[in-house]
Image (spheres, coloured by chain):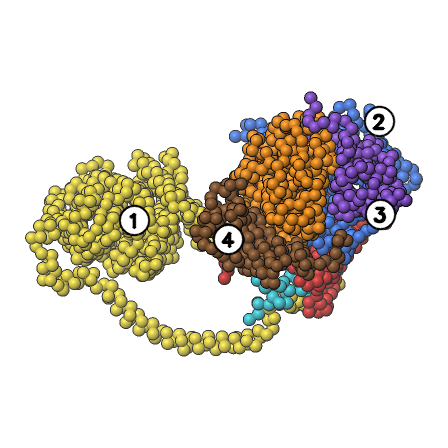
Chain colours: A purple, B brown, C orange, D red, E yellow, F blue, G cyan
Amino acid sequence: MYGKGILKGLSVTGRNVFRKRLTEKYPEVKPKLAERWRGSFQLDVNECIACGLCEKSCPNSAIKLTTEKTEDNKKRLSSYKLDRSYCLFCGLCVESCPKKCLRFTKEFETAVYNKDEVVLDLFNNQNLSAPTSSYAQPEKTGVTAGKEE
Amino acid sequence: MKNEKNYPELLTGRFGDKTVFNPEKPNEVYTDGDNLISVLEFLKNEGLNFLADISSVDYKEYFEVVYQLFSFDNSDHLTIKVKLDHNNPQVPSATALWETANWLEREVYDLMGITFINHPNLERILTWEGFEGHPLRKDFVSKKQSSRK
Amino acid sequence: MKTQTYTLNFGPQHPSTHGVLHVVLELDGEICVGSKTQIGYLHRGIEKLVEDRTYPQVIPYTDRLDYLSGMSNNLVYVQTIEKLMGIEVPERAEYIRVLLAELMRIASHMVGIGIYIMDLGAVSAVFYPFIEREKILELMSHISGGRMTFNYMRIGGVAYDLHPDFYPELDNFINEFPRFIEEYHKLVDDNEIFKARTKNIGVISAEKAMSYGLTGPNLRASGVDYDLRKISPYSVYDRFDFETAVGKNGDCYDRYVVRMKEVEESFKIIKQAYKEMPEGPVMAKVPKLIKPPVGDAYHQAENPKGILGCYVVSDGSPKPYRVHFRRPSFNNISIYDELFIGHKIADIVAILASFDIVLGEIDA
Amino acid sequence: MDLQVIAFWIIAFVTLGSALAVVYLTNIVHSALALIMTFLGIASLYLTLHADFLAAVQVLVYAGAVSILIVFGIMLITRGEGRMCETNTFGKYKYTAFVVIAALFGVISYFIIITPWQVTNGIVAEENMGTIGEVLFNNFVIPFELAAILLTVAMIGAIVIAREVKNLK
Amino acid sequence: MMESIGIKYIWLVPLAPLVAFILISLLFKRFKMLSAVTAIVSMAISFILSLDILRLVLTNHEITMNNPIEIAVPWIDINGLFIEAGALIDPLTAGMLFVVTFISLLVTIYSVGYMHDDPGFSRFFSYLGLFVFSMLGLVIANNYFQMFFFWELVGLCSYLLIGFYYYKNSAADANKKAFITNRVADFGFMLGIIILFVNFDTFNFGKLAEAINASSDLALITLAGILVFVGPIGKSGQFPLHVWLPDAMEGPTPVSALIHAATMVAAGVYLLARGFILFASSTTTITFIAYLGGFTALFAATIAVTQRDFKRILAFSTLSQLGYMVMAIGIGSLTAGMFHLTTHAFFKALMFLCAGSVIHALHKQDIFEMGGVFKEMKITGTCMVIGGLAIAGIPPFAGFWSKDEILLTAKANGFTLLYIMASITAFLTAFYMFRLIFLAFFGEKRSDFHAHESPLTMTIPLIILAVFSIFGGFIGAPFVEHGYASYVYFGEPHHPTPDLMVMVSSTLVAVAGIFLAWLIYIKKAISAEKIATQFAPIYKFLYNKWYIDEIYAWFFNKIVLGISNVFNWCDRYIVDGIAHSIAWIIRTSGYKGRYLHTGSLQTYGLVIFTAVVVITLFLAGPVVGGVQ
Amino acid sequence: MEFLNNIFVNIAQWIRELLAALGFSPVWVEMGMAVVYLVAILGVCVLVALFYVLWERKLAGYIQRRPGPNRLGPNGWLQTIADAMKLLTKEDVVPQGADRIVHLLAALFIFVPTVLALAVIPFGEGMAALDLNLGIFYLIAVTSLSTIPIFMAGWSSNNKYSLVGSMRAVAQMVSYEIPLVFSLLGVILIAGTMKLQGVVEAQSSVWFIVLQPVAFVIFLICAIAETNRAPFDLPEGESELTAGVYTEYSGMRWALFYLAEYCNMFVMSSVAATMFLGGWHGPLLPGWLWFLLKTFLIMSCFIWFRWTFPRIRVDHLMNFSWKVLVPLSLANVFVTGIGVYIYNNGLGWW
Amino acid sequence: MITLNHYLLLSAILFCIGLYGALSKKNAIAILISIELMLNAVNVNLVAITKFLTPGDITGQIFALFVIVVAACEVALGLAIVVAIYRDRSTVEVENLDWLKW
């Protein structure tokens, strides 16, 4: 019958009116982020050995770090800037960190008011209190590969 | 992957020494601009009726245009390569054989500056009309060269 | 009535050009008599950019080609390098790759179909597929941390093993997806208006499709049974039981039908890959610094939009000498100019949407 | 001041004003829009004359259909070239015609004024639609049918005339 | 009395074909079969209604020639001119209606086969419809005016049908010839009825009959009678206005059948019968009619003997038979004339349709190129032989009885000369008819052709007509009680007593004719060529149809043109001179004045309204003053 | 109950008496009442539009498994007011090439037919601002005017999308007016009056949707088309013509078009409620509430259709009107006529 | 008090405006529009005269109805002709449409 398809369509949309709404009420209800969420960055300066691997691994040269020699002739980080306007959030820097001291956090509200604030100064503002992501870090739970039986 | 037909043999039988093979790479054929169209037409009739791609490489001394031929019926694959003079890169257009060559050649022309003879509409496609130079050439210098070394 | 034709700039800012496609239409009333497709508004020069990056650093850029199916793009690129270097990938990694590629296909088709039908005017029809796509993106974020730009595939395998949270979510998805498929068929398939809008509109004959180098669902809708997963199976596709979706008429309706069928087939593959996934490592042994031997390699794979090809030339240094991508949408839309002629504006929108194009891929 | 009098003067003002605009404006689309206004004014004039049915017909036919037809006609023949505000200019008789028309108006109005009209103040039926229907289908049934045929003929004729002539050469 | 649907729907009898004509020409032109079916259905309706009328007339004895039913409505009612449109039903009309509709129906059916591949298929059927409409309108007419009206329509239709193949020069010439000749005759007819109307103030047959009976002005009636007779002379192809009829063969053969058998030429005879009182009232008229008819009969028969064209022979035979009918009426027997018309309609239609069938099969018309067709076309051949026997007057075929009645009447009424002429004609008729049959159907093939029997739509009408040609004569056979003569008569019904001598002699004459033909053309005992060379002048004279056409040509070229030249001169230099000078003045002033015409409508409008103002002021000024 | 039923009538009566008591002559009282009615209608217009804009967004959200507007006010119920405030305070942009006066006037004129039409709608027993003898005819005449402002808007914007949209709108509205009128004819035949009150009163025993189901469906379809709503929203045709007629409109004037669309929908659904669903008839609740409920039901159907169907193509649209709806509605009128004749005269007419 | 004269004068003015437009405008469609004005003026006359002179009778209204029909036909055909002319001549300025002269 002509018009049957139309009625079927109406029944589908009509039924959906009474189904559960899926929208997350965001500001009130925070989203549940994945363990490996790639949010903002944190750098544990104390752990950092200033090897510069992260700088080299960045495809877009978003990371600029400078080092200085300490008294005992050890390399030491003197500044660490990450320009998020260039950042692809590919995670290659985090992966390349031999000490696992550069980490993703689970922060996702990274909008800023001033253009300058886009550049993260991880040397002075390590942001260590932020919840960390498990990306390229030793997994906290069930790291073993394979399904859970 | 093994081809069903022995294209080197077929081509040699048809074109003699105008097509050059590397015995280690059985899926690669070198030919020159003059014979290109007849080779392509021959191969198209032999079953390689899918022109997947036309790409080009700037080897500094010379240009190379690379045609990737596949078949819609089986997994046969043959790469046709044409070496071009670096000063005057010209190659006949394959638009008469495949409509898809139209845009692919325009892209090559736009980005690599290789002229396709008898192309119906050889205009820039990805860059704008007044763009100077051909970006994918190794000697291309952008006015705003990227910050990267 | 003989009327004067007029030029209508369809795009680059237009709700139904899927981004910044620009079609200069010559219209006689509502009927198109001439068309010129202009692209490049989203050209970022990826092929040039990656010449300055090392081989692994290229992977994030491939995410941004067809940003609706980043995982599949990753896959093509890493497979090309693997081909160039002759690396064997562990079996588990291959299964993960297939699983993710097929999930990606579903996600991409969800957008393709949804936007397609939205462009025909049925706005609700875009939300239901997006709900399913959202689930897939959640799944992706569990394993890679990103929702659209994954950078998950690695030369020689995948970056990490699957996250434990991934499994229950996937179970959930597998349970709920069939209901969506059923509902969506009911909503769209038999709708008379939808059929009137799409049947016999934008008909592409098999010859035309082959000549224009169409690939993917657009080619198969025209009746050409060409699917790389079947014709020359890469990865481990030869181990799965699935069918290729093939249309008959090559019109807009068939393109929808083929996509829907393909989604169902992908779903089958996902279930199989999930069930049969072996244990083991996910990375092959690859050197720290990747320096492929001098030479070139071309590899292509069946992406959601069509065949994505990747041509890599190596000069033996850690950076690729030349990378070229055969972007399926780029080839697909070259038929537009011919196809639009004689159709009404509304049909043009339908045709445009039925191709499921992504401008990031077209403009590279 | 009677309400009716006020209404009449307002309507007369609007009607004649927009009629003047029809003629005076030099943009043909503006003229057409002013024409619609005139039609509406005349429809209200009918209302003051207790011709409700005719008023509705006036709105439906003139304002709803004829004006749209005219607008379509304008769209078909007014093309991009040239400026819209010069599409409806006066011809060479702008002044001559005015003189003649003024004289004509003088004559007409003179006769209207001097004619001793036999006005009878009867009461117009409140609902005259039924009456119109009865009269139309009894006394005027042949003109009515003829009008129907005329409309059909005109419609077909218009289609035939305006249709594109193919293979003329 | 009126419980007959035929009477009730009498108007439908002529109207049905008209409706068919309108439908076909306006709507069905593109649909071949639909137009054919429409035409056939309309004819069938007419036929059935006519049949019903006939039944009524036969069973109801109150309706007689002297007591017809008359149904009429006013047609034109202007001061002093009252014309009505109506139907007059008496046995004469009923019989005629039957013949016309019957033949028309058969011809129409036949045409479906005959015209099958013709591009003008639908056009043909639409013309047929119009033709039959005109004829039926003529037949049921109750007054001269209506009759004249339809008479002219019949003329028009014959023009259309004869010129059916208008792209052929000969057809175009033939239809012009037919039309012009008929106009000449119609002019006489028209004068006649005008005279009648002026004197008796009515067109109605019945009223006229009373008036004529009451009138004593013999000269007037004679004049009117002869003038009215001019009409039949033309329409029924009497000498000397017969020239169009043989040429009318240019039309499609079914049309020839229709014209010759039932419709056009019969109209003349029918008019004679219908207006018999007018002619009978004057001895001069009636005698003139009788002798003209007799002469035409003989004259045409002699020509027919020498002709070579299949259809042309039949045409001259028609002429000859028409002469018979006219003669029959002239000698005072309306019954015999109409009886012969009826039987003649059957067998002449039969023969024409046979001719059509042969021509359709052979695409040849010259009988000397035929021969032996009988073997291939058995049905057609048999039918043709039946037709030949009927026309030759061999008992018991239809022609015998009617011809016999004419001869009988001629003898009984004392027209001995005519009786002899008629007998000679009968002999010649039998001879040329069987000359035709023997040459065309028997003997060996004389040229290369492939004949084949015609389709069913063509043969079935043939068979039906053949049956009627065999048995149709019995309706008026002397031994039949209440035969034809009891219904159709003038004055009182009178049965001529059968005269065995006449019967035998006419039969013998016919048999002799057939035998002669057999001798010459089958047995070859006598050489036809030899006769022709021996009597060369006569043969040539006859072959060229007595040089009538040439006489006409000479007459018109020399005399009429000569007179015309005189008038031409007068016209050109005197009349035109005046006219031209006036025209010159006007043209010159117009030439100068045209500059006032700008072609701009607005200018005209402006001038008009200026004029309105000025004139209003001019005219109304005084009135206004008066009012004030 | 009785009180509730007549509450608005009583209020009108009270105002009338108040005006009279204030010493105005009857003429001026009538004038005053006209103003009151006008204000009431405009109020209804605006309130209804604001409510339905929100309801549409809510229902669309529900259909798409979203909650819809939920921020401003309780559960988002003040959202449209906030939007209206925002739009009112936005800059009134007129494009450079536009025909300024016509462009500005179009947005005002769009309301004229709507307000005129609402004047005759009986919201309850005796609750019509005007009760014309020619009610339905008047409605038809007035709604036929609504093409003109849309044309004005499209033409004056000097934008190709707008022009194409307005041409589509005009063609569409003219075409669908015919079946719309014919579908109402059946009801008029049965009710035997053109008075809207009379039509409602004729439905006291049985609603005309029972007697005229085909006409109701035709009316519904045509009403959607007349109001340019999806699936007949070609003049806007977002994915085809960006925003069609309204492309160049912004701020308040765009809001006026937007509100007018909802007002038109309200008019159409009130007509449907009046003509087919028995107007104010219904048990228990006051008449005007019944009326509003029925209107609400039809409006919800409009919204439901919009969020379910793809857009019809322009040639299908015209074909559908001329080849399906017009013959169908004519047949309906014909059958209804015969039915009414038989009902009135019995079958003994032969 | 509004009398018949008011209406008649109004319609006279309307008629004269229309006539002026018809005589002075260049654009053929403008002329058609002006003719519509004239027809409307006539209708006003008809209705007004019926109302004031023969109030019970509605023949005037019916006549006006027929005038409306004729006007609708006139517009349809007029526009068709104008469109046809435009197609042929690419202009609808009546001053250029003077093929009526010799």
- Residue beneath disc 1: E254
User: Observer-nearest residue: D135 or B137?
Assistant: B137
In this view, the residue in front, D126 or F40, is F40
Task: Relative to B133, say whether E131 is above or below.
Answer: above
Callout 3 and callout 1 share a chain = no
Which residue appears at 60% of the width and 41% of the height? C86
Q: Nearer the viewer, mark 2 or mark 4?
A: 4
Kind of residue indicated by mark 3 = Thr
State the image coordinates of residue G49 (x, y, percent, origin top left): 71, 52
Provide the residue designation for mark 3.
Answer: A66
Task: Give how far apart the Cα atoms at labels 1 and 4 are.
Answer: 85 Å
Numbered mark located on residue B20 in the image: 4
Residue F3, numbered label: 2
CB atoms at circles 4 and 3 under 8 Å apart?
no
Tag 1 secondary structure = helix
- In the image, are marks 2 and 4 on the same chain? no
Horizontal relation, residue E439 to residue F264: left or right? left
Q: Which amino acid does label 2 sit on?
A: Phe
The answer for which chain carries disc 3 is A
Callout 4 crowding tier (Cα within 10 Å): few <14, some 14–19, many ≥20 = some
Question: Do the residues indicated by labels 2 and 1 lie within the same chain of the protein?
Answer: no
Q: Which element is circle 2 on? A: helix
